[in-house]
Image (cartoon, rainbow, N blue to C red):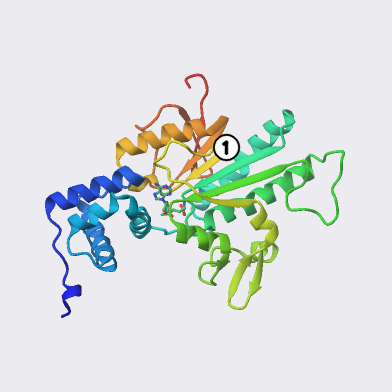
Amino acid sequence: MEATSIPMQLSEPELKLLQTLVYQECGMYFDERRAHFLQDRLQKRLRACRLESFYSYYRLLTSREGRSELAALLENLTINETSFFRNRPQLELFQKVVLEELLRRKHQQRDWNLRLWSAGCSTGQEPYTLGMMLCDALAYYQLRNPLPCGLPSPRPLVPPPWRVEILASDISYSALRAAQEGGYSEQQMEPVDYMYRLRYFDRVGERYLAKPALRQVVQFDFHNLKTEYLPQRNDIIFCRNVMIYFDEAEQKRLIEKLYRCLNAGGYLFVGHAETLFGLSDKFRMIHQHNGTAYQRSEGDT
Ligand SMILES: C[S@@+](CC[C@H](N)C(=O)[O-])C[C@H]1O[C@@H](n2cnc3c(N)ncnc32)[C@H](O)[C@@H]1O
């Protein structure tokens, strides 16, 4: 066996130091159950950096020169599992109940701006799903509530006067790059039915590429949900399957920040295995179509 492939032993104090550093940097908490995963990824990075001890690796991560290595480590620790149309009952609630209420309310107020945020968007399947569903909901709404101005030809994806912005952010640069490219394999496209494929994707060789019109409504950017400076004035936030990796204290801080990132009456969607129960009483739970969403309640900001 080569000397470099012998796994280095991570002592208890070294584990604590690195665990705390990762937690402080991105909120991900590796408790005893997940410590072996952390250890495995640390081993890999240590080898890549050709360092001899975990302590010297910790010193590198906390130095000025180590900022890019810290980003590489966090990248290696994130779980990027995602899919198109993930949690369909919840998406049905999003399209049939939440968007319907939001469009009607905005229409009454003559506010034509819609801003969604997919926080922790991974490789883009979530924001593109939201883009397709939102554009369809807008077309259907416009059909039932035509505006006097009429529609230009060819019909744009977002009918005027509506303006749509879907911000999609993540802490992983490689996930963001893949999302921005917008190319997906047949296997990744499995949950996307043929009507959606035809309208929103081009077939390029073996892959499907999101059409430019769909890409135009989604903007990708880097945001670390651990920080205080997060995108404001959102009507809807999807933050699904992200806080599951945080501990309770960090989850509470995140929910509080997301509350402040929402417009009055805005909606928050969390993952199937996540809940706001016990974390915040500033939201009203909506449960319909077998899906759950949370609406920001007003009065106790
Ligand atoms: C399991 S994926 C979920 C993707 C998508 N939301 C879904 O439900 O299908 C979790 C994503 O959260 C991102 N993430 C983890 N910690 C983060 C942080 N502190 N700030 C921003 N994104 C983070 C990861 O990089 C990963 O892409």
Q: In the picture shown, does residue 237 fall above or below 61?
A: above
Residue 45 drawn at (x, y percent): 28, 63
In this rendering, position of residue 7 left or right of residue 253? left
Seen from this angle, which residue lies furthest top? 299
In this rendering, position of residue 122 left or right of residue 29? right
In this rendering, position of residue 178 left or right of residue 148? left
| Quarter occupied by residue 149 | top right
| Quarter occupied by residue 198 | bottom right
Q: In the picture shown, does residue 278 fall above or below 10?
A: above
Seen from this angle, which residue lies furthest front? 65
Q: Secondary structure at mark 1?
A: strand
Q: Identity of the amino acid at label 1? A: Asn
Give 2 or 119, whichever is nearer the viewer.
2
Does the Cβ of the disc 1 residue fall within 8 Å of ligand 1? no
Residue 17 drawn at (x, y percent): 20, 48
Label 1 crowd bin: few (<14), some (14–19), many (20+), radius 10 Å: many
Give 32 or 281, whichever is nearer the viewer.
32
The N terminus lies in which quarter of the figure? Answer: bottom left
Q: At 19% across and 58% down in the image, what residue appears?
A: 54
What is the number of callouts on the image?
1
Q: At 58% across and 77% down in the image, what residue appears?
A: 206
Q: Which residue is mark 1?
A: 234
In this rendering, position of residue 35 left or right of residue 107? left
Q: In the picture shown, does residue 34 fall above or below 149?
A: below
Asked whether residue 10 is in view, the answer is yes
Residue 103 drawn at (x, y percent): 68, 37
Asked whether residue 34 is in view, the answer is no
Q: At 28% across and 65% down in the image, what residue appears?
A: 49
Residue 260 drawn at (x, y percent): 49, 30
